[in-house]
Image (cartoon, rainbow, N blue to C red):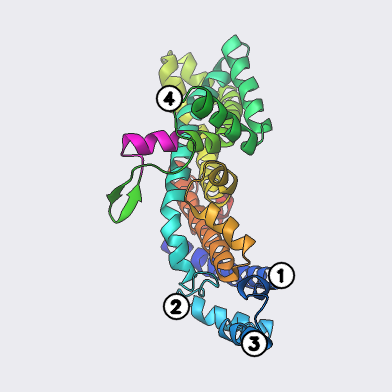
Amino acid sequence: MTEYIIRRLLQSSLVLVAMSVLVFAGVYAIGNPIELLVNPMADDAERARVIANLGLDKPLWEQYLTFFKGALTGDLGKSFVFNVPAVGLILQKLPATIELALCAMVIAILFGIPLGLWAGLKPDSIAGKTIMAGSILGFSLPTFWVGLLLIMLFSVQLGWLPSNGRGDTVNVLGFEVSFLTADGLSHLFMPALNLALFKLSLIIRLTRAGTREALLQDYVKFARAKGLRASRVVGVHVLKNIMIPIVTVIGLEFGSVIAFAIVTESIFAWPGTGKLLIDSITSLDRPVIVAYLMIIVTLFIVINLVVDILYSVLDPRVRLGQGAGQGAH
């Protein structure tokens, strides 16, 4: 296990270096932030001073080396707009995004696995067909359209829920969270539901497919032949075996929920990293964009490692650190 983790960390370091080159080159090669940061009426001397202060007068490769040296110590540069460390700016907003993503995944898991099991165990029933039809809608409907529809229904028409903001928060271990207050929950419900819809549909379909396949396996037929209760057959023999691919997908999808919550955060004015990223792109705040992308890449790498370890726990046949461990991907 230790050998496997060390090897994965070394591989991850190489991935991070490669991604840093691609991200830095891609972001810094586009646009000219000076046009937005400097008053159009400023003279050439003032423009040259700002360009030098931001380090934009150096060749791109030299700018990257400066960025890389700082990244080794956790310094991903200072925001052009706010003149504060980009990492600190993102970490201020990240807890709100993580809270939103966690709530969305909890909704998707709590409803997706039971509904998928139901649809898999009774595929020809009205309930099973209705569940699958609903999952197709979840895949098909655009996130921004569903978000606007939720606002129109629950905020405008019924007046039950607030349409924007995060609401009241409480401090837990140094982080502000909103799900522990009634007002915070009312603000959290709609954006979390909107963000969960696609993941819910994915888990339903994955669970149904796994259930249908597991029911055809010999170990399930043998368990039924022994006269075991249906609940035990499903809970022990079916659910335990289908959880391996489900855990893998849930882990990777959690990373994507954090990375791509931009649309939902924009619709509901949720004060997370998505809104910060949109504002940074608009103002060509390059350090913030690069720092955000590098943090997301790191997050995906960590999640992937955790998923691989969980995979080995759920399936004892997989031994991390050996040849079989390569099958965990």
Looking at the image, is mark 1 or mark 3 earlier in the sequence?
1
Q: Residue furthest front?
A: 41
Mark 2 vs mark 3, CA separation in Å: 29 Å
Residue under circle 4? 235
Nearer the camera: disc 2 or disc 3:
3
Q: Which mark is residue 31?
A: 1
Q: What amino acid does circle 1 point to? A: Gly
Residue 207: tell me if it is visible: no
Q: CA distance from mark 2 to mark 4?
A: 48 Å
Q: Estimate the spatial distance between the alpha carbons at disc 4 and disc 3, rounded to whole Å.
A: 68 Å
Mark 4 or mark 1, which is nearer the start of the sequence? 1
Residue 56 horizontal/vertical position (percent):
64, 82
Q: Amino acid at mark 4?
A: Gly
- x, y percentage for residue 245? 55, 39
User: Residue at 52% across / 19% down in the picture?
Assistant: 118
Residues under labels 1 and 3: Cα distance?
A: 17 Å
Q: Dots 1 and 3: beta carbons under 8 Å?
A: no
At mark 4, the secondary structure is helix
Is 199 above or below relative to 312?
A: above
Label located before the other in sequence (4 or 3):
3
Q: Which residue is mark 3?
A: 48
Res. 90 in view? yes
Inter-mark Cα distance, 1 to 2:
28 Å
Q: Residue at x 44, y 77 (%)?
A: 73
Q: Nearer the viewer, mark 4 or mark 3?
A: 3
